[in-house]
Image: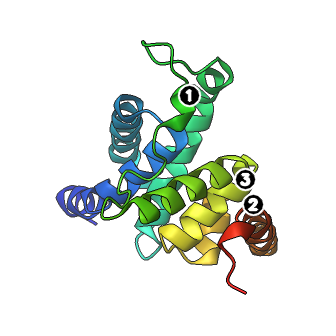
Amino acid sequence: MAESDFQRQALQHLDALYNFAVYLTRKPPEADDLVQETYLRAFRFAHRFQPGTHLRAWLFQILRNTFLTFYRLREREAALAEDGVPDWDVPMFHDAPDDSAGAMDAHTDLERAMRRLPEEFRTVLLLAEVEGLPLEEVARVMACPVGTVKSRIFRAKERLRVLLRDYETS
């Protein structure tokens, strides 16, 4: 694959990578940096990409590994914005609904419930259900077997059902 073709195809996934980076960092400026670092690494190691495989999953894997390497230590620090308000309330999904108060409340409740899930559950759910990656590609990103991905998705959905039981219809 020619370098210009690779770069063009890789840049088609910019929005999805940014969404994932915002989810991981919870801070848009850090998400910008993370996506930029991801593309720098992807372009530098483009020769390692195997044509015919899933480029989007490869980019997600680079982004996640970069986050785990450079940004995870920051997550352990108390997350406070400059005004002293906890940063954990920053929207996880930057395309939050804004059409009605009820939809916004449900979206906020979903984000809070997602934050209560262990990281490996949140990540597989986001990659598989929100970003639409095939389970095999999620397994590659997470560096685990497909069966583990399926199990984590199931357990994540079960925990979300419990956390969001007020939304169940009788």
Q: In this view, does 87 lie above or below 13?
A: above
* Residue 114 pos. (x, y %): 64, 54
Does residue 83 appear left or right of residue 149 in this picture? left
Alpha-carbon neighbours of circle 2 within 10 Å: few (<14), some, or many (≥20)? some
Q: Distance between the residues labelled 2 and 1?
A: 28 Å
- For numbered disc 1, what is the local secondary structure? loop
- For numbered disc 2, what is the local secondary structure? helix
Q: Name the residue under label 3.
A: 120
Kind of residue sitting beneath label 1 = Tyr
Alpha-carbon neighbours of circle 3 within 10 Å: few (<14), some, or many (≥20)? some
**Discs 2, 3 touching: Cβ within 8 Å:** no
- Mark 2 and mark 3 lie on one chain; the one further toward the N terminus is 3
Q: In this view, does 38 lie above or below 33?
A: below
Alpha-carbon neighbours of circle 1 within 10 Å: few (<14), some, or many (≥20)? some
Q: Is residue 42 above or below residue 7?
A: above
- Mark 2 and mark 1 lie on one chain; the one further toward the N terminus is 1
Q: Mark 1 points at which residue?
A: 71
Q: How far apart are marks 3 and 1 (CA)?
A: 16 Å
Q: Mark 2 points at which residue?
A: 163
* Residue 77 pos. (x, y %): 65, 17
- Mark 3 and mark 1 lie on one chain; the one further toward the N terminus is 1
Quarter of the picture containing the C terminus is bottom right
- For numbered disc 3, what is the local secondary structure? helix
Residue in front for this viewpoint, 53 or 126:
126
Does residue 146 appear left or right of residue 14 in this picture? right
**Discs 3, 1 touching: Cβ within 8 Å:** no
Does residue 126 appear left or right of residue 153 in this picture? left
Instruction: Quadrant for residue 145, please give it.
Output: bottom right
Residue in front for this viewpoint, 162 or 61:
162
Q: Residue at x 76, y 49 (%)?
A: 118
* Residue 80 pos. (x, y %): 53, 18
Instruction: Quadrant for residue 74, please give it.
Output: top right
